Image (cartoon, helix red, strand yellow):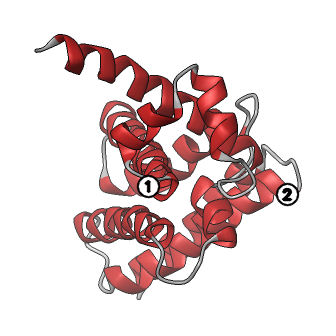
Amino acid sequence: MSTATNDRLPARERLLAAADELFYEEGVHSVGIDRVIERAGVAKATLYSAFGSKEELIRAYLAARHAATRDRMTRELAARYHTPRERLLGVFDVQGESFSEPGFRGCPFVSACAEARPGSTTEEAAEEARAWIRSLFVDLAKQACINDPERLARQLVLVYDAAGIAAWMDRDSGAAAAARAVATALLDAAAVA
């Protein structure tokens, strides 16, 4: 790797870390690019050479958030739960762990989309994350031999979204337990149908 590449990688990582903190705490459009640059300790030209625009920095921030959530969920479900039913319900346990983390401010995708223009890269990045959670529920429902896995997945996504919003808006870290109870009832009803 060249010296220029080595110099750029740490600056890129610093920019992403600064964006992650500021965008999550205050909103992607509320935070000006100068604040991200200042927090990262880089020059403005570095941001533009690494990302090209603030919009692309927002996309990278959301992609990193999604990757972290996906990796954590995948790892925890595989390590802690043995059956498809346990994994379906375990999604809410893993989600709930983030509710009690310091600085929890809800779903970064909901927050970013609330500020986004229709058709923006923000909406595209959010849709990728949402598509993944939907497909996770569909796959787990299929593994659990549910007759209509798509229907159950749609219901569970609603519960998942509601849990995140309740945990943030109501400051209720117990929202995950309530969501798990609702998910259990939905799963039991789907298994009988």
Query: Which image quarter is the N terminus in?
Result: top left
Task: Give residue 59's mark.
Answer: 1
Which residue is depicted at the point 35% across and 38% down? Answer: 50
Task: Give residue 169's mark.
Answer: 2
User: Observer-nearest residue: 184 or 169?
Assistant: 169
**How far across and down, in percent of the image, does residue 31 sit?**
72, 48
Please report contact status of discs 1 and 2: CB closer than 8 Å, yes or no.
Answer: no
**How far across and down, in percent of the image, does residue 134 sit?**
39, 70
Instruction: Provide the secondary structure element on which disc 2 rests.
Output: helix
Dot 2: few (<14), some (14–19), or many (≥20) neighbours within 10 Å? few
Q: If you read the primary sequence from the N terminus, does the residue marked by circle 1 or circle 2 appear first?
A: 1
Separation of disc 1 and disc 2 at Cα?
25 Å
Left or right relative to 117: residue 46 = left
Quadrant assignment, res 178: bottom right
Residue 43 drawn above or below residue 129: above
The amino acid type found where label 2 is placed reads Met
Dot 1: few (<14), some (14–19), or many (≥20) neighbours within 10 Å? many
The amino acid type found where label 1 is placed reads Arg
- Mark in the foreground, 1 or 2: 1
Residue 107 drawn above or below residue 73: below
**How far across and down, in percent of the image, does residue 87 sit?**
39, 50
Query: Which image quarter is the C terminus in?
Result: bottom left
Instruction: Provide the secondary structure element on which disc 1 rests.
Output: helix
Which residue is depicted at the point 70% across and 52% down? Answer: 106
Left or right relative to 106: residue 157 = left
Left or right relative to 130: residue 98 = right
